Image (tube, grey):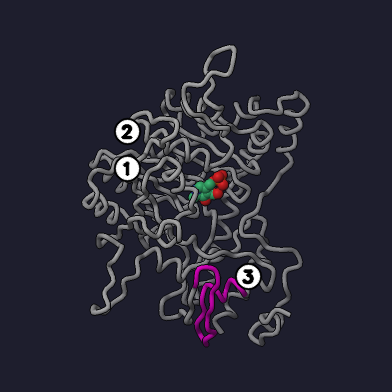
Amino acid sequence: MNRFLEDPRFTGIEPFESKLWLSSPTMHGAERHWVDDAIQTNWVSTVGANIDAVEEEMAAFTGNRYAVGLSSGTAALHLATKLAGEKLYGQARPDRGTLAGKKVFASDMTFDASVNPIAYEDGEAVFIDTEYDTWNMSPEALEKAFQLYPEVQLVVIAHLYGTPAKMQEIKEICDRHGALIVEDAAESLGAKYKMNGQWVETGALGQYNCISFNGNKIITGSSGGLFLTDSREDADKVRKWSTQSREAAPWYQHEEIGYNYRMSNIVAGIVRGQIPYMEEHISQKKALYERYQEGLQDLPVKMNPFDEENSVPNYWLSCLLIDEDAMAPAVRGEREHLYHTEKGKSSPGEIQDALTAFNAESRPIWKPMHMQPIYRTFPFVTAKGNGRGSTNAYIAGSAADVGADIFRRGLCLPSDNKMTEEQQKKVLEIIHRCFL
Ligand SMILES: Cc1ncc(COP(=O)(O)O)c(C=O)c1O
């Protein structure tokens, strides 16, 4: 028996009969039409009308001239990062990455797929701390990073949980230092940002832009992703690399290293059926976010914030951040966690365990990259400067960076667009009881 079900604080609450997901696919039926069409016409390959339609519709929606359908957001990020490296540092031998020996600035609080392509291309990520206003890359820390590493020419930026980063400031800093931007809009499709007074879709804010159709995203193809650009030459290059870099010859002829990264026409059929429902999914997610905001008002927590004047999120995930003085003691190891239960206080671990006990999925805030074992020896820059080796046994005061702090106090809540108001009320009730 789960201890939460016996805990008197939770008396009267029954587990959800079917699991409440963090963010699951929402099919409408139209997807089947395009998948059937691919099967009936025998275009069951990485060529076909569905891919063409998805590329055309999404390029138009995001405001890019070109879109290239790929097998995943990760594949899009890899080729975007490789292309940026080639543009900056020249063509690499097939056994070397285009970023060999180079540093690249990258968002720190993101999913590792944003930054791993830097390593695929033999570069070294320098992680840039987060800011409290949007939970994205801090422009101040980025400016500090250019002071420490003025030679850097590439910046990888993600928009966490569908909330746009402060792109006006970030773009200005990058322009001043002559750096290019790889934009990871995997989580933020449909979110907009006001750039120089004009609304621009995320996925159109960098030189090399990427989105994802992973099963948990705002619309899905079960998997899949897009590389988006205004450059015909870049789109052609990515399409070539994604299909094993074949040359125009009667036999298999290769002058460059290639990848099997092209989108399937079946996956594209699902995406094609989903596109008309993107706005509906976003408004459902927005309603969830607003109900959480309202329902959590009386607790010592805040929701994931966004810049209300200059951005419109897609509200992909709703998250909470517990006020420092309402945090019950909690520790996290590499794989396990422990926490105390205290009256009037709680912790992300306790709330997550309680929701799990009642059959609802939640997830800790993405653990920052500079804290991940694989990247622990990589540079990290905060608004104060070098974020590594900044603690001292003889000087009091917290050395915690913003990313570590949000990771420690935050939690992603069930944000499935199919969740009913009734179900969400119960989720809110469970969260409230954690603070009893
Ligand atoms: C921020 C971010 N970047 C990249 C990816 C990778 O996308 P995909 O799963 O389509 O490879 C994801 C999610 O999966 C993500 O959340």
Q: Earlier in the sequence, mark 1 or mark 3?
A: 1
Q: Residue at x 35, y 47 (%)?
A: 167
Q: Disc 1 or 2, which lies upstream in sequence?
A: 2
For the residues bearing labels 1 and 2, Cβ distance under 8 angstroms: yes
Front position among marks 1 and 3: 1
Instruction: Please name the residue shown 47% across and 21% down the image.
Output: 255
Answer above or below: position of 377 versus 294. above
- Crowding around mark 3 (Cα neighbors within 10 Å: few <14, some 14 to 19, many 20+) is many
- Report x, y in % for residue 263: 60, 33
Please state which of residues 270 and 86 is positioned toward the viewer in this rendering: 86
Local packing at callout 1 (Cα closer than 10 Å; few below 14, some 14-19, many 20+) is some
Residue that label 2 marks: 89
Q: Nearer the viewer, residue 283 or 323?
A: 323
Structural distance between the alpha carbons of marks 2 and 3: 51 Å
Instruction: Please tell me which of labels 2 and 3 falls first in the chain.
Output: 2
Range of the magenta residues?
333-353
Identify the residue position indicated by label 1 in the image.
102
Q: Secondary structure at mark 3?
A: helix
Report the Cα–Cα distance between label 1 and label 3: 46 Å
Q: Which residue is mark 3?
A: 427
Type of amino acid at the residue the image marks with label 1? Lys
**Of the two numbered discs 2 and 3 in the rendering, the one whose residue sits closer to the viewer:** 2
Q: Is residue 63 magenta?
A: no
Q: Is residue 279 left or right of residue 97?
A: right
Q: Tell me if the residue at label 1 has its CB under 8 Å from ligand 1.
A: no
Asked which secondary structure carries label 2, the reply is helix
